[in-house]
Image (cartoon, coloured by chain):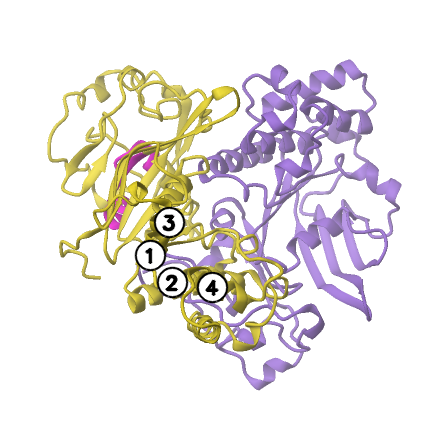
Amino acid sequence: MNKALPAKPILEVNDLDIVFTLRRNQKVRAVDRVSFSVREGETFGIIGESGSGKSTVGRCIVCMNPPSHGTVRHYGEDLFALPERELRRRRRAFQIVFQDPNAALDPRMTLVESVREPLDVAGIGTAKERESKALAMLERVAMAPELAWRYPHEISGGQKQRANIARALMLEPKLIVCDEVVAALDVSIQADMLNLFADLQREFNLTYVFISHDLRVVAHVSDRVAVMYFGKIVELGAAGEIMEAPLHPYTQALMSAEPEPVPVEQRNRKRIVLKGEIPSALNPPSGCRFHTRCPRAQSECMAREPEWRELTPGRFVACHFAEAPNSRSATDHRTGAPISAGHTHSHAGSMSTKAAPHGESFREEAT
Amino acid sequence: MNVLAQSHGRLTLPGENLLDIRNLCVFFRGDSGWLQMLKDVSLTVKPGEVVGLVGESGCGKSLTALSVLNLLPLRGCRRTGQILFEGEDLVPVSESGMRAIRGRRIGMIFQEPMSALDPVFTVGTQISETVLAHLNVSRKEADERTVEALANVGIASPRNVAAMYPMSLSGGMRQRVMIAIALICEPRLLIADEPTTALDVTIQAQIMDLLLELGSRTGIAILFITHNLGLVAESCSRMLTMYAGEIVEDGPVQDILARPLHPYTAGLLGSLPHRQARKSRLSSIPGRVPSITEMPSGCRFGPRCSYAEPECNAPQSLLPLGARHVRCRRHETLSLAGSGHE
């Protein structure tokens, strides 16, 4: 797709923090200083594991929860600054489709009623017009017409997800946040659904923010990808570049952990098995959030939080040692990297001389 | 560690199958008579072998696992065929007989580590319960074995964790506890039903490594049930594909990935997004699995198969082809693409 043109940003997220308050006034920073922008017509992927804050970002984009700090601008405008009534009206252009197709549909409404509901709420058109529009949209998402008057329990998960997509499209949105939309579906249905998303994007000129834990899916659909870990974006760039040569050790580990269903002789990746788990959100680690699990961590990483740097144009990373020449790319022996970087970093040389203090905390093996 | 293995009633001879399921059929009682959920499922697991059973939801792979341990409902359910474990048929074994087998000679790990653990007992109690039920040991020794088992599954402070309740553990930790329970009596066969599906990929990698390492260290055989073809490719030596309650393909993993013989296996492999072909159109399998009451009498995949001919409407049998089996009469004429790329 022709994405080289400087399309205007439909969405600009700047320094976004989202803090939740728990019992006893404990604060959890679910999203921590996140910045990115999404261009009109592109698919922006967000990858991360559970608890990384990816869904919280998604909900903030569609104005379901407000930022605690920082701004989210849609077409250059801060919708959260508007009065409630106005916010409700304006956020129609930004829709979301959720992971669980069952929970997203009211079990007491037929599919056509569920799909029509956004128009009912918005008060658009006559009842008859609304219904015919809902039926047309169900047909567009390739749902058999006889299913329209069925209830959710009577149809399969894939069909339910089609109804959810139809519903998200009813208010003619500009941007749709797809939050783990294929995670609950079998692979053959998943393929159908991803094809449908691609068709709808072309037809309605949609922008997608595609959130998933499945690297393969995100990489397949996205133009650009952000990788989130523990509330922060650790790496951002063109999907192809990130897949070919990931810079952040977390991205590398994530990619190497994804099992590949190919014959053994074509499996040319090194496995990096991370030790440990995502730390507790109530007690975040110092410095770089990833240092407790990072195979390349140095004392530097515990002391100081890495800056969010643009290494090459459009390629951002938050790691002190992103340009270290011996950085272990999950795919480097295929692409022939060492990764070339725009600037050298003063700490780059220290990798080879210092023994990593967390060296015993990871294991690497060729598969 | 292998002291216990000798106390098992009968040991299999080399080359003999540890588990040999022959023509297993499972029926559930429906509103109008019996419904056949599994049809002629046959599979073998040799000692120490890791066998993958793949298929999409509802194909009967979990039901196969539950049938082996007879964890099916007591009423309204019927099994026919043979389930030979260490040469003994488990189908006629009574409930009390099965209790001596479950957890002792066959271990099982379920998909959802939260619902498989009891929230009102500590982790340690739930592990030592298994030991006390099966082995003639004192409570003190059972507790020691519990701590040892937790250490074996890579838990850093096993004594502390043993005193914790499941709710204070993460998903990955809970699944480690499940593995500890399944392996504590050193069974010869482990049935792992989607053991990593509820986990994040980096945790999945840890758990798979742990399972395979424990498997190779203790010589335990694993029947690994999953929908994730990538995991099968990287951990199993043999795989079986199930579709609509039947085995449709069976063979060495590498051969099947390189050249699947059944159109359904090929369809599954083809519908996965590929790193080398971003943004391309994905191939998908049209239609959906027929409902159990409307199962075609011929090839069950026929209505969705793009290679189907009128002759496919006749019942299909599982055809032997050297080390492989396939339930497709057209397998010789079809040249199906595998997951490999040129």
Which residue sits furthest left?
Answer: A343
Write down the chain letter for disc 2.
Answer: A
Query: Magenta includes A237?
Result: yes
| Numbered tag placed on residue A85 in the rendering | 3
Q: Position of residue A103 (x, y in %)?
A: 56, 52
Instruction: Please state the extent of the stretch shown in magenta in the rendering.
Output: A233-252
Q: CA distance from mark 3 to mark 2?
A: 17 Å
| B5 is higher (above) or lower (below) than B146 | below
The mark closer to the camera, 1 or 4, is: 4
Q: CA distance from mark 2 to mark 1?
A: 7 Å
Write down the chain letter for disc 4.
Answer: A
Q: Relative to A322, is B226 on the left or the right?
A: right
Quick check: marks 4 and 3 in contact, CB under 8 Å?
A: no
Quick check: marks 1 and 4 in contact, CB under 8 Å?
A: no
Q: Nearer the viewer, residue B112 or B308?
A: B112
Residue highlighted by disc 2:
A171
Residue highlighted by disc 1:
A93
Secondary element type, mark 4:
helix
Other-residue count near label 1 (Cα within 10 Å), few / some / many at <14 / 14–19 / ≥20? some
Give the image quarter of residue B250. Answer: bottom right
Write the residue at 14% across / 25% down: A345
Q: Position of residue A344 (x, y in %)?
A: 12, 28
**Label tally:** 4
The mark closer to the camera, 3 or 2, is: 3
Q: Look at chain B in the picture and name its colour.
A: purple
Quick check: marks 2 and 4 in contact, CB under 8 Å?
A: no
- Compare marks 1 and 3 and give the one earlier in the sequence: 3
Q: Look at chain A in the picture and name its colour.
A: yellow
Q: Name the image quarter holding the C terminus of chain A.
A: top left
Other-residue count near label 3 (Cα within 10 Å), few / some / many at <14 / 14–19 / ≥20? few
The mark closer to the camera, 4 or 3, is: 3
